[in-house]
């Protein structure tokens, strides 16, 4: 039997299928619980790659992928093809391609630093040369980026959702840590990505987790709120009944007693519930203990809601920015495509109400993980990358860098004011008019929602789903002048750092927030701790 492996290298983790190449049947599915590199978003991963070196980032990522593919329990000596998909930064790190041209924008910056823009076209490479533990001769199939900053994952969501064939104005967004989005107006496509942060993936949330068995994925109102919990097939089922006003939890459904945490879509539902119940005021939950108690000890606090609202604000600012640059109004946009795990499990009506979707969208399509789906299509049809290259070459894309964009800055500042200070929407819109930006209309009516898949990974295969927790990569080092006070260890918010008795610093990369934090380095009383001097350790 000949096997194939399809991979989605995502900001929040890696997902993969083992496939029987004789009939295209998916055999099993494996996912990692997080990304192996330090950081909370794609920019943190990029900064780590620049500071630590492309080789270090590449080795960490390949080490993790090799651990993942071993859990397929197939003969890796019979793997004929591997296909991958992801954003340009993740795929570049996976392939060992320098990322300097992605880190520094503009021709002037490239000339000043002697940076050569890398080619990221479709291609066939050696999987062994990249570092995968497969047999010699195994092919690595890579789809193209549309432009160097608009990756294969963006192409996947356009290609798999039907966005490219849509004749009316439409928008697609992948609801994840790095929210890629595109707006199609006629033959023109406007793209951008908002660093929404990890809240949409259930990370940086007290009880947060990725979409996996035991995750609360929604709160469904039925006189009280019913927790929807993902079962072993990652399908949402009824859990306990929650009365937010009375602050009571009643075990009732088949998933009562089985919740382990809450995923990003559950956080969205909790935000909507807190607002509908008038329990959120000027950045604080007004419950007796400042918590929203769900089931099985899982809760949401004010910090969690703030993190979610910041992510929602970044996405709404991105939607505003695309519309303004395209020169169209919200009223001109009716069709919305949602991709990714959050785009699959989230209640689209709730999401529109709190700002994750443009308020005028009347027709909403919810798709799953389009990146893994396209990688699997490529595995089954090795000629597909050539077709995708033709599509990528034919797309007239206008990529907008939200960082530094005046419209994005205006809207995101307003979103923070609404979140933290309780700014009214009347003031929000008055400020927009003064800045020459359209007003945000109110959501009206109930949209028509088409859920195209039951879960973000529709087919898990007969072998089912395996979640990989131990990716086992560490950074270690000694700092000259260290007094062994342990303050760095105490200050780490993710408990990623350990200081040994002989003053060796050990950092688990999968838990570390990297450049999003650096509290360990900043807390050193002797100022001798330098994070970038830690060295890589692989099993």
Image (cartoon, grey):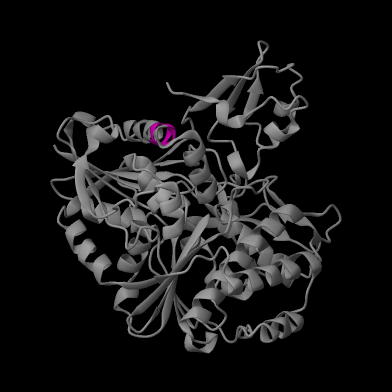
Residue beneath the point at 65% across and 59% down: 308
x and y percent of residue 497 in the render?
A: 64, 27
Q: The N terminus lies in which quarter of the figure?
A: top left
Q: Is residue 73 left or right of residue 517?
A: left
First to last magenta residue range: 56-61
The x, y position of residue 471, in whole percent, is 46, 31
Residue 383 higher or lower than 188, as above or below:
above
Viewer-proximal residue among 503 and 157: 503
Q: Is residue 120 visible?
A: yes
Please tell me whether residue 231 is drawn above or below residue 524 in the rendered image.
Answer: below
> Which quadrant would residue 455 be assigned to in this image?
bottom left
Q: Is residue 57 magenta?
A: yes
Q: Residue furthest front?
A: 112
Residue sticking out furthest to the right: 288
Name the residue located 79 percent from the left edge and 62 percent from the top edge: 283
Residue 127: x, y in percent?
Answer: 23, 37
Q: Quadrant of residue 21?
A: top left
Residue 70 x, y percent position in the rendering: 33, 31
The residue located at (58%, 54%) in the rendering is 197
The kind of secondary structure the magenta stretch mainly shows is: helix
Q: Farthest residue toward the top?
A: 502
Quadrant of image for the C terminus: top left
């Amino acid at each position: 039997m000949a096997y194939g492996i399809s991979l989605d290298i995502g900001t929040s983790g890696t997902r993969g299928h083992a496939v029987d190449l004789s009939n295209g049947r998916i055999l099993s599915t494996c996912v990692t619980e997080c990304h192996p590199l330090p950081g909370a978003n794609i920019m943190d991963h990029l900064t780590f790659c620049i500071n630590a070196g492309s080789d270090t980032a590449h080795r960490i990522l390949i080490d993790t992928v090799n651990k993942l593919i071993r859990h397929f329990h197939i003969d890796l000596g019979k793997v004929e093809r591997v296909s991958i998909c992801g954003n340009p930064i993740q795929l570049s790190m996976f392939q060992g391609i320098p990322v300097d041209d992605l880190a520094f924008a503009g021709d002037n910056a490239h000339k000043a630093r002697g940076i050569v823009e890398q080619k990221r076209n479709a291609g066939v490479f050696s999987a062994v040369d990249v570092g995968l533990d497969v047999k010699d001769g195994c092919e690595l199939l890579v789809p193209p980026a549309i432009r160097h900053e608009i990756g294969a994952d963006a192409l996947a969501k356009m290609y798999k959702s039907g966005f490219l064939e849509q004749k009316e104005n439409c928008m697609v967004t992948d609801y994840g840590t790095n929210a890629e989005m595109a707006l199609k107006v006629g033959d023109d496509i406007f793209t951008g990505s908002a660093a929404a942060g990890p809240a949409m993936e259930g990370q940086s949330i007290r009880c947060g987790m990725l979409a996996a068995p035991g995750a609360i994925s929604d709160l469904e109102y039925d006189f009280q709120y019913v927790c929807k919990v993902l079962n072993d097939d990652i399908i949402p089922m009824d859990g306990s009944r929650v009365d937010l006003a009375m602050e009571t939890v009643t075990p009732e459904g088949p998933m009562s007693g089985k919740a382990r945490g809450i995923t990003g879509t559950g956080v969205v539902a909790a935000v909507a519930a807190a607002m509908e119940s008038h329990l959120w005021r000027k950045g604080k939950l007004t419950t007796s203990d400042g918590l929203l108690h769900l089931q099985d000890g899982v809760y949401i606090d004010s910090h969690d809601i703030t993190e979610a609202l910041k992510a929602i604000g970044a996405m709404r600012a991105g939607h505003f920015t695309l519309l303004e640059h395209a020169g169209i109004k919200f009223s001109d946009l009716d069709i919305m495509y949602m991709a990714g795990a959050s785009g699959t499990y989230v209640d689209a009506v709730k999401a529109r109400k709190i700002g994750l979707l443009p308020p005028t969208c009347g027709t909403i399509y919810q798709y799953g993980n389009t990146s893994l789906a396209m990688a699997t299509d490529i595995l089954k049809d090795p000629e597909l990358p050539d077709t995708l290259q033709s599509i990528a070459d034919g797309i007239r894309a206008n990529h907008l860098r939200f960082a530094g964009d005046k419209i994005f800055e205006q809207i995101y500042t307003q979103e923070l004011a609404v979140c933290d200070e309780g700014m009214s929407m009347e003031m929000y819109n008055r400020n927009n008019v003064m800045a020459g930006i359209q007003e945000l209309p109110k959501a009206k009516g109930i949209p028509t929602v088409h859920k195209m898949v039951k879960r973000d990974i529709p087919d898990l295969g007969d072998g089912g789903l395996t979640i990989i927790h131990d990716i086992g990569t560490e950074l270690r080092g000694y700092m000259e002048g260290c007094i062994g006070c342990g303050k760095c260890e105490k200050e780490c918010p993710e408990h990623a750092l350990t200081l040994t008795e002989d003053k060796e610093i050990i950092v688990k990369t999968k838990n570390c927030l990297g450049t999003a934090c650096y509290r360990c380095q900043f807390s050193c009383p002797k100022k001798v701790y330098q994070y970038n001097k830690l060295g890589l350790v692989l099993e």
